[in-house]
Amino acid sequence: MFVRQLLGFFILNVAMLGHGAGFSDGVDSTWTLSTTSGNCVLEQGVGGYAEARFIGVRGQRLRFEVLGHRDLFAPEPVDVLRVAPPWHADFPSTDVITQVPHSSGGAIGATDPVATRILMKLYEGFDTHLARSGWYAPDTAVAVEISSVNFRPLYEHFIDCFRGPSAGSWADMERTRVSYDRGITALDADAEVDLKNVAACVLADSQVTRVFVDGHTDASGTERKNQPLSKRRAESVAAFLRSKGVPNAEPPPTNRP
């Protein structure tokens, strides 16, 4: 009996070496949404191999991770592919959209803006495949297939969960104002909280492609002093938004005192 079991194990590994290994639940895939200690987690189990999840925390960057129960990938970055399933209008298109780090033990993870790119591709009905050669043989492939089936119904609930009820939609956030003490350009703690919420809305809304930041001052002081002050304030806000993953945040060509 032991010899037969060992032989079966050996044959299985030979098959994996020759043909690679793929993990998917296909149309039976299920997404679940849960909240734990302030973390909003949108999660899917993948073929008994891993848990794929998005983790949203208000005021922080969205995180995407795949936690493998075992490690089959070679120790190098993993390709992330956008794959159109058979029922998608773009079938059979497949594109590599980015790479994500892979750590020893099987964990794969990324934060914004990569995490939001993956999130939005799933929302658009594309599957996400993670692919790389296996550590056991460089000429074989390992693929983890994350399905978009049943994703969209939970998407809005997930976004509302980690944005919080006061964050609202982008339409509510696009006129956000940040106040400064006289002559100051540095952001205070309250301003940073407001801008983190703005960044979360931008990254969650694929229709927002650019953010313009306009700087102002009050009527005190001369125009000669206020014009460069308003410009520095706009630049400080734009730099903060970019640091939170908003790629196209910039002051307009001119800023008014």
Image (tube, rainbow, N blue to C red):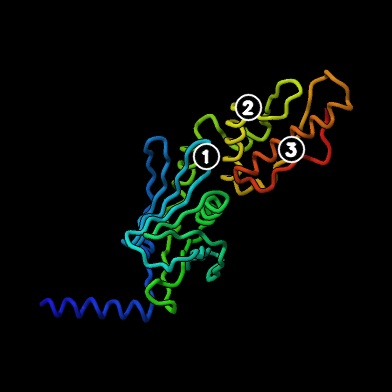
**Residue indicated by mark 1:** 60
- On the image, the x and y values in percent for residue 102 come to 45, 60
Quadrant (top left/top right/bottom left/bottom right) for the C terminus:
top right
Rounded to the nearest whole Å, what is the CA distance between mark 3 and mark 2?
15 Å
The answer to whether 45 is drawn above or below residue 250 in the figure is below
Dot 2: within a 10 Å radius of its alpha carbon, few (fewer than 14), some, or many (20 or more) residues? few
SS at mark 2? loop
Which mark is in front, 2 or 1? 2
Res. 235 mark: 3
User: Quadrant location of residue 211?
Assistant: top right
Residue at position x 61%, y 36% in the image: 198
- On the image, the x and y values in percent for residue 74 come to 43, 69
**Residue indicated by mark 2:** 188
The answer to whether 83 is drawn above or below residue 3 in the figure is above
- On the image, the x and y values in percent for residue 53 come to 42, 51
Mark toward the start of the polypeptide (3 vs 2): 2
Rounded to the nearest whole Å, what is the CA distance between mark 1 and mark 3?
21 Å
Dot 3: within a 10 Å radius of its alpha carbon, few (fewer than 14), some, or many (20 or more) residues? many
Rounded to the nearest whole Å, what is the CA distance between mark 2 and mark 1?
17 Å
Residue 215 or residue 164, whichever sits in front: 215
Please give left or right for residue 48 compared with residue 218 in the image: left
For the residue marked with disc 1, what is the amino acid?
Answer: Gln
Residue at position x 41%, y 72% in the image: 134
The answer to whether 128 is drawn above or below residue 111 in the figure is below
For the residue marked with disc 2, what is the amino acid?
Answer: Asp
Res. 86 mark: none
